[in-house]
């Protein structure tokens, strides 16, 4: 997605004895056809591992003839990771990619030195039955990969490892976790998983990755005696073993990895380790030096500020 303005998330720092370092509560913003809740970046935390942007899209039900229409826009220095719970999105990009993404599948688009793409509700989903609910995350690229060639990969639901049993289903979207590795190619040590727990089921999260978080999508969970409801991003202290117990049917995303190799600058849809590279990307989009999306002549102009 293109960067959409949103109020800063509310952040609460907990006691050092608590395995949870920070609780981030995104603020919802209505962008016309659906709501977006942004958890990252926040004042308390810019990144968790390589994750530098984390948006919940929806849940939304579209009226007849309407849907999501994110016109072509550019990215540099990151990979976008799109994962849906409900609905369908048509992805097109400047590499010539043109395909839908459906629930449980993964679109991983590596921007590298520069890519443009659009995301729209397909025409067949605009008959009044269209829905949208999912997560789009941006993963910052290591410095060595910021200028790599852009690329796109799509992975079917059946291709992703599923760790199941004892009331738990953990689908590994990217990286490594619980002894499994996703086929999605990544550029740094990371993990990203979709977890569903039945009431009473418990999921341990070891300290194998230094930076870890859990975004609560649905239901209520208990961690170290505290209850947490949907719509919160929990950031865990490094080194602490954590157990997440479902008090109701619950769904959450686990995310994190190794700390990035330095801070990142963010401006609109651009992520870079230097301000000069951001300025260059601005000039390139303004001058139409980015490759455009075939078959989609619209575009989002460079913001004024």
Image: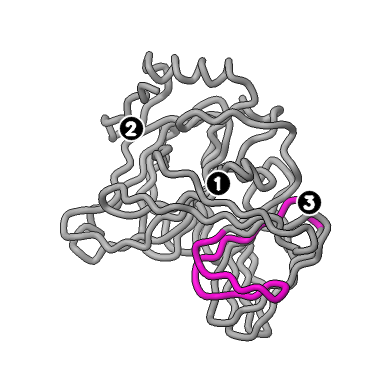
The residue that label 2 is drawn on is: 294
State the CA–CA distance, disc 2 to disc 1. 31 Å
Task: Depth check: give the residue in front, 221 or 160.
Answer: 221
**Which residue sits at x=26%, y=52%?**
33
Q: Which mark is residue 40?
A: 1
**Which residue sits at x=48%, y=55%?**
135
Give the SS element for disc 1.
strand
**Which residue sits at x=81%, y=62%?**
240
Asked if 50 appears above or below 271 in the picture, the reply is below
Judging from the image, the colouring scheme is: one colour
Using the rendered image of the protein, determine whether residue 153 is visible from the camera's viewpoint. Answer: no
Residue stretch in magenta: 208-232
**Rendering quarter of residue 16:** bottom right
State the CA–CA distance, disc 2 to disc 3. 41 Å
Single out the mark in the foreground, 1 or 3.
1
The residue that label 3 is drawn on is: 210
């Amino acid at each position: 997605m293109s960067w959409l303005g949103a109020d800063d998330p509310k952040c609460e720092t907990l006691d050092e004895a608590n395995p949870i370092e920070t609780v981030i509560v995104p603020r919802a913003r209505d962008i016309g056809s659906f709501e977006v809740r942004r958890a990252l970046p926040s004042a308390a935390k810019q990144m968790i591992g390589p994750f530098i942007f984390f948006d919940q899209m929806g849940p939304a039900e579209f009226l007849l003839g309407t849907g999501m229409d994110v016109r072509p826009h550019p990215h540099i220095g990151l990979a976008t990771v799109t994962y849906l719970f409900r609905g369908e999105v048509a992805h097109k990009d400047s590499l010539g990619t043109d395909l839908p993404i459906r629930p449980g599948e993964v679109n991983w688009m590596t921007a590298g030195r520069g890519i443009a793409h659009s995301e729209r509700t397909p025409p067949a989903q605009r008959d009044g039955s269209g829905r949208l609910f999912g997560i789009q995350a941006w993963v910052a690229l290591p410095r060595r990969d910021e200028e790599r060639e852009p690329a796109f990969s799509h992975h079917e639901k059946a291709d992703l490892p599923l760790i199941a049993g004892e009331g738990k289903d953990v689908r590994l979207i990217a990286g490594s976790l619980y002894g499994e590795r996703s086929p999605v190619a990544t550029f740094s040590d990371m993990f990203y998983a979709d977890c569903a727990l039945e009431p009473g089921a418990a999921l341990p999260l070891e300290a194998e990755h230094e930076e870890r978080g859990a975004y609560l999508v649905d239901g209520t969970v208990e961690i170290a005696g505290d209850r947490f409801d949907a719509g919160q991003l929990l950031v865990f202290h490094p080194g602490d073993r954590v157990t997440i117990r479902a008090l109701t049917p619950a769904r959450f995303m686990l995310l994190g990895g190794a700390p990035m190799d330095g801070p990142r600058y963010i401006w609109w849809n651009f992520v870079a380790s230097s301000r000069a590279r951001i300025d260059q990307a601005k000039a390139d989009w303004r001058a139409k030096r980015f490759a455009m999306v075939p078959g989609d002549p619209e575009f989002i102009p460079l913001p004024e500020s």
